[in-house]
Amino acid sequence: MRHTVEQPVMARVMEVLDDAPELRTLWLERKMKFQPGQFVMIWIPELDEKPYAVSAQAPGHIAITVRKRGPFSTRLMEMRPGETVGVRGPYGHGFVPKPNGAIIAGGCGLAMVATLKEARPEMPLFFGAKTADEVIYRDRFPDMEVCTDDGTTGYRCFPTDRLRPRLERGEFKVVYTCGPEVMMRAVFDLCEKHGVECQAALERYMKCGFGLCGQCTCGDQLVCQDGPVFDSKALRRMEEFGRSARLKSGQKVTLKQYADGRSC
Amino acid sequence: MADLSVSLCGIKLANPTVMASGILGTTRLLLRRAAASGAGAVTMKSVSLLSRGGHPNPTILSFDAGMINAVGYSNPGLEETLKEFADLSDIPAPLFASVVGQNADEFSRVAERITKLPFAAIELPLSCPHTPGYGTLAGQSTPEATFEITAAVRKVTDKPIFVKVSPNVPAIGEVASAAEKGGASAITAVNSMGPGMLINIEARRPMLAFKMGGVTGAALRPVAVRCVYDIYKTVKIPIIGTGGVSCGAHAIEMMMAGATAVGVGSAVFDGGMGVFAQIAREMEDWMDRNGVEKVEELIGAAHR
Ligand SMILES: Cc1cc2nc3c(=O)[nH]c(=O)nc-3n(C[C@H](O)[C@H](O)[C@H](O)COP(=O)(O)O)c2cc1C
């Protein structure tokens, strides 16, 4: 019988890069085979453990990109080279790359799709942030179409506004997305309207990461194991997608309440 | 074709597997999915009067011989739970509720409301080893407390009550007897054992945030089988044998020890939701090979 040992294994922080005032990338010493869209659980002993996308990879190394939210992410961002964090994973199902794709990301959701863009550099990447200060990975993806809510850089609109006309022209067969769930819902609805497949990476409060506890459920799916990337067929059946999520207790709340209650 | 159906306190199960509490039982849709994938019955995640966030992560890890967890009874509380499970009509297997409390009064206050939901039975775990205020940490697994809590809940429900016991007691038969005297309809044996601990040697720290947690899966199985065997000798009510079952042979072993139904939890880790159907298929194969027509004939076979 297959029985895997799922425990955090300590990894050394090699380098810490400032992406934006409240966003940092941590390079960790860890060899890992993963698909874009999968995630790892990062453990800080005596504090907590949280899921993060693998945001970049180099031989023998992976990176995570951390946004400042609560005590856990704050501590993670303060890590110095030489310190260690626990890593387990990768978990879940990632993106399934297909021809004629486009990628659309919002905020730190870009971390989740970054390795997909690297694997498929021909795919156009649309990125939305609140303001110029929050635009990350500019050097990494020089062809990225940047939009900001306040117009401080790039186009002053939502990235969906840039995607829409090109979907109307039938340029894409599949759209990959990660970002705030209201944005992903808008992307999905747009794709549905144009008969284009959508693959969205969802986020829910997570515990085990391997499909046992039922904490991260969305519809009858487990975000940790069936997801985090879901295709149109699965998204269509998820009444909660774009509407509600569950707190640590399992209480179902609106996405806004969920975002406010999150303390990672 | 072998007959896998069992009758548990008058509840008909298509096969003896029961999805154990705390495994995937957080929502109506997950219970439905588990039932549709072949579980003979499914149990909801335990509910307490007020909502609980549970312990910080890591809460659930695996090791070479099983799992360890300190989830800490995270649940949205009674009121939200009443909404979540109000309609269970589209779920293709019997459902069991699970109620926890800090004392007999709290157990009965929650059970009194939960009994109005369309669950076929109510389980009372008196045996969690890692949640302060509940289970073994609150002294609920002594024969006296077991009797008191069971009797209190008996007053507020006509449904079958399953009392879930801890393997960490010197004389498990006495605890089961106390439950039976208090009005229990069945015994679920067992909850997780320990608590145990896993230390990350590089970090030099325990890995669970609560430091210690209940041990389940393979390591628990021989202990669970012995507990079921002891309980079968001391009470008349049926037993839901739970602990480390991951294949048909394990389920048959549990039934031979005295179980009428077989709880399955940690095996979902390796086998996914298909594990219930897989176990049932393996039981059927074994019965066909051994000329056993009705699975109920196996209950307590090791005692005869
Ligand atoms: C992650 C996890 C959460 C659990 N939560 C509960 C719970 O809320 N209530 C309960 O009565 N038992 C709970 N249990 C115990 C199981 O129901 C079961 O008794 C135990 O895991 C032994 O069975 P197994 O070896 O098949 O897992 C939990 C077990 C695990 C692994």
Image (spheres, coloured by chain):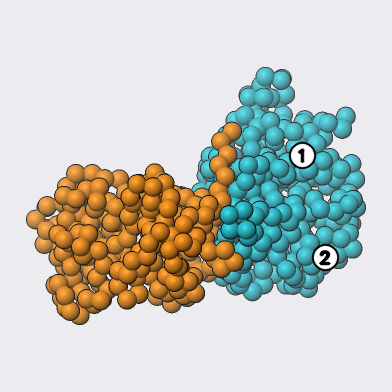
Give left or right: position of A42 versus B202.
left
Q: Residue furthest front?
A: A82
* Label 2 beta carbon within 8 A of ligand 1: no
Residue visible at 29% across and 52% down in the picture: A115
Which one is in front, B199 or A255?
Answer: B199
Give the percent coordinates (x, y) of residue A10: 52, 55
Residue where numbered disc 1 is placed: B222
Which one is in front, A88 or A261?
Answer: A88
Report crowding for label 2: few under 14, some 14 to 19, many 20 or more residues within 10 A (C-alpha).
Answer: some
Residue visible at 43% across and 63% down in the picture: A81
Say what secondary structure mark 2 lies in: loop
- Label drawn at residue B3: none
**Residue B240, above or below B291:** below
Give the percent coordinates (x, y) of residue B102: 75, 71
Give left or right: position of B229 versus A169.
right
Chain letter, cyan: B
Snapshot quadrant of residue B208? bottom right
Residue visible at 85% across and 45% down in the picture: B231
Q: Quadrant of the C terminus of chain B?
A: top right
Q: Is residue B115 visible?
A: no
Residue where numbered disc 2 is placed: B139
